[in-house]
Amino acid sequence: MTEDSKFTSKRMSRRRVLATAGVGALVAASPFRINLAMAQEPTIKIGFPVPLTGPYGTEAQDQVRAAEVAIAEFNEGGGLNGRKAELLVRDDKLNPGEAATRTLELVEKEKVNFIVGSLSAAVQLAVNNVTKQRGIIFNSISQSDTINEVSDFSKFTFHEALNPHMTAGAVGRYAFPKFGKKVAFLTADYAYGHEMVRGFQEAGKAFGVETVTDVRHPIGTTDFSALLPRIQALKPDILCISNFGRDQQIALKQATDFGMKKSMKIVAPILLYTGRVAAGAQAFDGVVGGTSYYWGIEDKVASAKAFNDRFRKMHGGKVPSDYGALGYGGVKTLLMGARAAGSLDADKVIAAVEALKYDYYKGPQYYRKCDHQSVQSVFIIESKANPQKGDADVFNVISTDEPNEANLRTCEALGHKN
Amino acid sequence: MIDIAPTIAASSSRSYNWFDLAKRHRVLLASIFVLIFPFVMPFTALAVNILIYGLYALGFNLLFGYLGLLSFGHAALFGTGAYLCGIAIVHFGLPWYAAIAIGVLSALVMATLIGSLAIRTRGIYFAMVTMALAQCVYYIFYQAVDWTGGENGLRGINVRAINLFGLHFDFINPLVRYYVVASFVILAFFVLSRILASPFGAVIEAVRENEARARASGYNVVATRLMTFILSGGFCGLAGSLAALHLSIVPIEILHYETSGMVVMMALLGGMGTFFGPFVGAAVFLLLENLVSLWTVHWQLVVGGVFVVCVLFFPEGIWGTILKRIKP
Amino acid sequence: MSGLSFDLIALQLFTGLALGAIYVLFAIGLSLIFGMLTVVNFAHGAFYMVGAYAGLFLVSMGGNFWICLVGVPLLVGTFGMIVERFLVRPLYGRGIDYPLLLTFGLSYIMIELIRIAFGTSGYPFDTPELLQGAVDIGVGYFPLYRLFVIGATAVVLIGLWLFLERTSFGLVIRAGARDPQIVRVLGVDVSRVWLIVFGIGTAIAGFAGLLAAPLQGVIPEMGATILAEAFVVTVVGGMGSIGGAVLAGLLVGVVVSMSSLFAPEMAKVSIFALMAIVLLIRPQGFFGRAGLMS
């Protein structure tokens, strides 16, 4: 990510720059620069709050890289009747309060046209609350069921990412017939964890699955050793690790140490590319999970090949991660919607995005009308024991759960009328 | 607060009068400063945050700077105010002014509860008991998902308009939001200034300076401490309520011990025991974090460095050092 | 609750002890530094994290886990002494708030420097080959590495005890904690004692970080959670008391482990509730001196 595209603020007035000059050197070094190209038509501004600092900094930086790909493609394609797009990246620090403040800045001061971003569930809900009050379209690339529900949803809310109901459901449909009916859960005790369990259990009904235990742990647990013996004692066929990120890495590592993989199959709704790289092959060995995107699908999916190639070219041969690809999809859909609408007017863009049938990077997708959830495929992946094609070669795609509205929670269940 | 600056240039005998005059009218001077403040800030939402955290630090300083008790649990008071104000609006549909009143009241109640348990301990143990009790408060709010949203935070504190004496203000407008918050903060300045100038204010400082002597003079030390803790809670609760209205959400992080730690840092950075020090500390802390994080993802390095330098070379805090320099 | 048996409870107890062992190591350093220097070391978690990264670094340089067990405490302890000499020492006599604020700022710097040097996303840390797998301890299978952690903690504790109780330098340290003024009058260079105490405290924190690395992997933020919990341990045990830190560390480990068996939603709050109760009944903790720092 280059400094230029990262934080450009073209409407910074001269007076305000002078006023803040008391902070001296800081401002001199800061990104507030006066752009001389003001005469041109103003750019389309997309605010992009992501947690650049903190434990998900790696994912966030990849989200920025992928979003830049979408911006570059849009601008090369002529923009919106010649109007170029630009990305305004902000660090939400994984804190909803900071995210809300940053969103206010983007909306009130930078006058952004759209907001795309967020990584944690709480942050996306905070951003969404700010944008929906002010009529700004927000495309969330964080996973959560809550944002689809009627109390948080507004017509300005779009959800490009998967949600736990979809991923857990897809993994369940793959795993239950293959590995057995006695299922144990190890669940992070918060909304996101509970949503995953609900997703597994909904999918499990069709297979007559029996839940032997649902062990809850607080989010941010660093030692699961107190919980694992209990699960082991119940001898389940499948252990569903229903947590995320660092919790998942440690849980898998310790489950491996306790020898649990010998007696049961371990599955997780979401396996993160970055998480797998950080925790190593041993902890993830044999674990089956879901993902919204893995670069390895490029052999089968043409749009993935094109996206990967462009990403490699722009970012020194790197491949995009799952969360990165969401950054691309989130920005791309809104820009293409704006182009289809021929306008930046919120209502026209909403109608255009609702009408999109798109295949930008992972196969066919569209937004469901009632909750603006992107209906899309879920890839079932398994961690490779021995990567062959370099460090990035960490997963095998073993199945694809095709896009199907029946796999989503119904509009009625979410509280929507129609 | 900025208007004291001319005294540096003035001659020493005149500057004494200037200083005294400025001190007597500190609330007025601060009010003028608060009025122009949003125009010198990078963006208005940050200016509002600085007001809110400044007020939070001011309330904390009443206990820490004036009474000399280091609390590591003030997030519980700030957060209780925020949550109860938010719950009043989201779950009960109360108007904004009633919600603020409930936020402040609930913080007072929470301060009474925590305070009456904690004031029995002293020194570092007081800090630790307040931290432990605040953690318990954190988990109570965390578990009460139906009321607070749990990990997801409380959303939907949507105040669109403020109607006052027949006047209609658009609360979505950033400057309106700023001045609504600012008027509460100025009110708090005034109340705090009155408290400190009152006989009770003198007792607070007497207890800090020499507890045994204060007791011998017939003052009830325990009651003074508890009362100060509760008053401090009221200011923090007001700050919390304003935070809820400003961001229209209450994140669970507001109750985290980092929020308690942050206010200690703000007070020390600005200068504990001075009237505006904590406010200056909050402003510098947030502004620094904001500007540096725009410039580099390694903002924590710079913020940490500033702390270390301040501790080593400006032990009285930024405002404390300035006051010392210009004081005749 | 299904599947609850005597064996499971016994196993859970053992798990709690292993968990507590890390708390103990972390908390003795904290307690030692506080007891002798009256410094509340907010950077202790950062030293713990640096210990894990130092181990990672030594392994990448061709070392193995056993070399790390010696090398990491030396590296981290040396670093701790540098910090004491140049940053903490100027603050003695200025009250408890200043070292607290300084170490708080320092922890920011240390974490960020590690992020710059090693990246934000963390690394796996393999359990040494010899200690992989689980052994039957009578009530069920228990990971070998966790037994090793309990053993290593015991060794460090015995070593520290012998050092403090049986050497003349240990005598000076204990005297210095009680009354630095008198010790100085007797012609002992107190600042050198404090330097070494800070070094030992941080070295043990680094050692704890290394021991924790194969359990959880290594990330820059790993010290933050344990710091809050370790404060609970030191306070419950009594600030400045090493025996108290040991007892309270094990107690906290067992409380966490047992509450996650019986009431998992209470696991996190249980230790803070424990702390609040202990302090309200006995404000100075188990073994703390009353009136300290008041």
Image: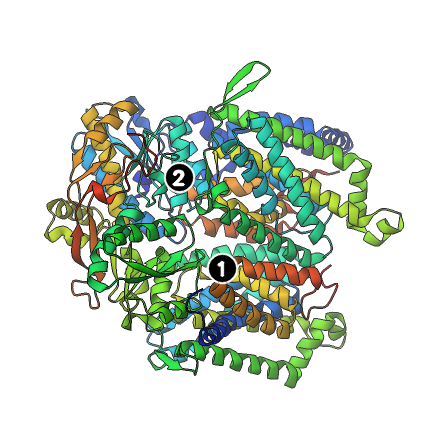
Q: Which residue is mark 2?
A: A125
Q: Chain of mark 2?
A: A
Task: Please state the horizontal and vertical placement of residue A324, each as a whole percent of the image.
Answer: 27, 47
Where C145 falls versus A29 (above or below)? below
Q: Chain of mark 1?
A: C
Quadrant in the rendering for residue A114:
top left
Image quadrant in which you'd find residue C64: bottom left
Q: Is residue A281 above or below residue B159?
A: below
Image point (26%, 63%), residue name: A287
Q: Give the amino acid type for the residue marked by disc 2 in the picture.
A: Leu
Numbered disc 1: secondary structure? helix
Q: Position of residue B182 (x, y in %)?
A: 58, 28
How many residues crowd around disc 1 within 10 Å: few (fewer than 14), some, or many (20 or more)? Answer: few
The foreground one among B310 and C133 is: C133
Quadrant where the C terminus of chain C sits is bottom right
* Three-letter code for the amino acid on which mark 1 is drawn: Thr
Q: Which residue: 71% across, 61% down? A: C293
Q: Which residue is mark 1?
A: C225
Q: Are marks 1 and 2 on the same chain?
A: no
Q: Is residue B134 above or below residue A415?
A: below
The residue at 31%/24% (across/down) is A38
